[in-house]
Image: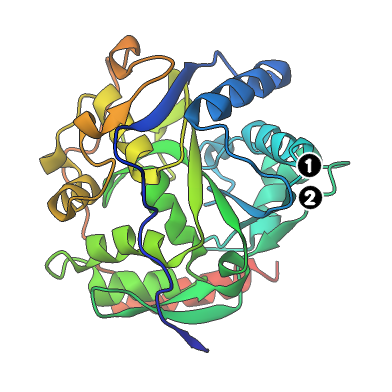
Amino acid sequence: MRRLEPRMGLREFEAGPIKVALGSCQGYEPDRLAQTTDELLRAAGDFRFNGLKVLVKPNLLRAGNNGLACTHPRVTGAVCRYLKDAGARVRVGDSPGFGSARRVARRIGLVDELKGLGVEVVNLDGAVRVRLPFGHSLGVSRQALENDLIFNLPKLKVHNQMRMTGAVKNLFGCVVGVRKAVAHTKHGDVSNRFESMLVELQGVLPQSMAMIDGIRAMHVKGPSGGEPYSLNLMGASLSNQALDTSIYMILNLRPDEIPLWREARARGYPGARPEDLAFPLRRPDEFDSRGFMIPKTLDPATFHPLRLAKSAVKRAWARIV
């Protein structure tokens, strides 16, 4: 596995607030999704995609729970159509904990959604050892690194270890396969190392932007076994952190409740504070999140070595069945 040193820092933003475009979207009807995607991306910064090699990175965690754990395939399809129409060269990819991205994509209907678009679904393999500023390395997918842009497509849901998972956490899927479990085993619950790893990962990946699927969110528990919550929200930003901060605001959360938010604020990352943000469309206080439940207590982030071994066996089996 070739070693790669960090080649860039976090995306630099010009002085002034970072735009977060928030919009209401009542369900996954294709025409409505296409219109909302267009409105959000234009308002977030009207990024130019022509000629760019773009990896669309949805959350393809697993196909259970009626697909609730994954970014909805129609959201991914809407983004891919937008990018293709804008002249981008597009692939969809992830590295699920178990099985392959294409297998999950097929089971949730994403492969069918992308038919006729000329967009393939790839498993993010080919680990490259990337050293992060906090002093440790991760095996990041070469297929993720070799892009002009990562279009990050997280699902809005709670997480039993991080309390919430959004745009910043979704980029952890660029770490190859069982290496994510190894990172849990090595860094989970050791000071702030796991949070440092997740927030610093952004800086060694290609430039990214994000749009979140919060139409039918997951609450109570997660990231896979929770319950649906109709928030009817989509949001987009050129900053992963800014988009996540806006979601925390909508859900009336505090930095001390969210380990990744607390870490980003401590580091002074752009977009980690509400005063860093501008809302060209709807504001966070225009969304009703009453009844949205987050985990009261957090599970350990560390994986026991036996769990790591079981994870490796389950992953290998899931890829051949």
With respect to residue 236, does 56 lie above or below? below
Q: Is residue 285 left or right of residue 168?
A: left
With respect to residue 314, does 18 lie above or below? above
Residue at image coords 40%, 75%: 6
Q: First in sequence, mark 2 or 1: give its number.
A: 1
At label 1, counting other C-alpha atoms closer than 10 Å, the crowd grade (few under 14, some 14-19, many 20 or more) is many
- Per the rendering, the mark at residue 119 is 2
- Point out residue 201 in the picture as x, y percentages from the top left corner: 37, 64
Q: Quadrant of residue 158?
A: top left
- Per the rendering, the mark at residue 114 is 1
Q: Quadrant of residue 242?
A: top left
Q: Nearer the viewer, residue 205 or 86?
A: 86
Q: Is residue 288 left or right of residue 40?
A: left
With respect to residue 192, does 239 lie above or below? above
Q: Can residue 298 be seen in the rendering of this structure?
A: no
Q: Nearer the viewer, residue 290 or 296?
A: 290
Tell me the element at label 2. loop
Q: Is residue 32 left or right of residue 307?
A: right
Q: Can residue 288 be seen in the rendering of this structure?
A: yes
- Point out residue 14 in the picture as x, y percentages from the top left corner: 35, 42
Q: Which amino acid does label 2 sit on?
A: Val
Query: Does the residue at mark 2 contact the one at mark 1 (Cβ under 8 Å)?
Result: yes
Tell me the element at label 1. loop
- Point out residue 159 in the picture as x, y percentages from the top left corner: 32, 45
- Per the rendering, the mark at residue 87 is none
Pair 2/1: label in front: 2
